Amino acid sequence: MRNNLNWDIIKKFSSEETPCFSLEDVITSYPDRGKNYLAKVLSKMVAEGVVIRLKKGLYHIVPLNEDADHFIPDWHLVAKYLMKRKRYYIGYYSAMQIHGLITQPSLKEIIVTDIQVKPNITKINNAEFQFVHHIDKRFFGFENTWIDDYNKVQCSDLEKTIVDALGKPHYSGGMVEIGKAIHETRKKINIEKIVEYLLRFESQTAIKRYLFISNLLDIWSDEHQRLLSNTGSSISPLDTTAPNEGKINTKFGLRVNINPETIKEAIFT
């Protein structure tokens, strides 16, 4: 009977949007079985390598062609499960990874929400899930995006990924990574769209950083020129991952607190 239940649990949750499920999900699906009994069933399934335990009460189905001892879940799908029935999108460094803009793997998944999530960091296995709150006017520019041949997640589109990163560089690997992303996408980015997003985002600092990098990399157009009138008079740090010190660039209203040559070297060498 238990083996039949094991298989039934696998079939049921394999057909869901994500391969994750909780003990509470199982209790809801099998109300005629006791909680303690179902917890023992799941423990046995973990021992058999059919599922892995991500944390107390949270499980992930192990694909048939994978070994449970070496299986690493797709953290984007785990994020999707964590935000089930909530408004969210995968953003910043995690979105850069989905868009193929970085090759360095990360053990931190960044999830943008329109609500305050506390605690704002949750650890699951060796991964960290960080929830970043955006106010309503900045919670836009995302879509259901393929992450493999079978699964989609809510992810910021290419232009919004860049805009979000410019607003909070520390969530996107710093300005060196962002500069590389802007250079790599220079021929496929929709310039009108990114300008629209920057203005809608209402962050003069994000605009300053975008114009500085565009100027540094010789990516300049009439659209960039028009944005110059939206930079304001305050001085902002170029990179939030570096100390707030360095020369001031008056054209863009930035304290250049990293060596711009390190951005160019990362791209061209």
Image (tube, rainbow, N blue to C red):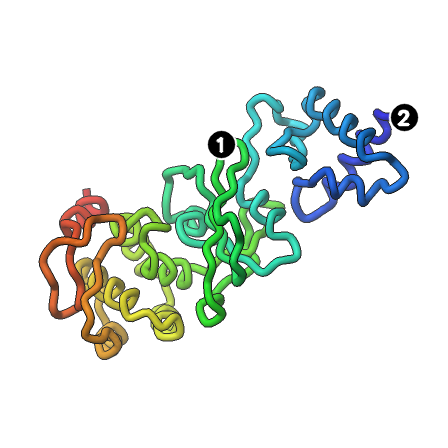
Compare residues 136 and 2 and report the one nearer the observer.
136
Which residue is the extreme one toward the front? Answer: 118
Q: Position of residue 226 (x, y in %)?
A: 24, 78
Q: Residue at x 25, y 62 (%)?
A: 209
The reply, left or right, for residue 203 in relation to residue 111 is left
| Foreground residue among 144 and 140 | 140
State the mark number for residue 1: 2
Tell me the residue at 35%/57% (across/down).
165
Q: Label 1 amino acid?
A: Asn
The residue sitting at the left extreme is 247
The secondary structure type at the circle numbered 2 is: loop
Q: What residue sits 22% from the left and 75% below the top?
A: 232
Q: Is residue 236 left or right of residue 78?
A: left
Question: Residue 128 vs residue 199: left or right?
Answer: right
Where is residue 217 drawn, in percent x and y?
A: 19, 58
Image: 103 above or below 249: above
Q: Amino acid at mark 2?
A: Met
Nearer-the-camera pick, 11 or 199: 199
What mark, if any, has residue 126 been given in the picture? Answer: 1
- Which quarter of the rendering shows the C terminus? top left
Residue 5: x and y in percent read 84, 31
Q: Quadrant of residue 191?
A: bottom left
Q: CA distance from mark 1 to mark 2?
A: 34 Å
Horizontal side of residue 77 vs 238, given as left or right: right
Give the residue drawn at x 33%, y 61%. 167
- Reply above or below: 145 against 26: below
Mark with earlier residue (1, 2): 2
Label 1: few (<14), some (14–19) or many (≥20) C-alpha neighbours in 10 Å: few
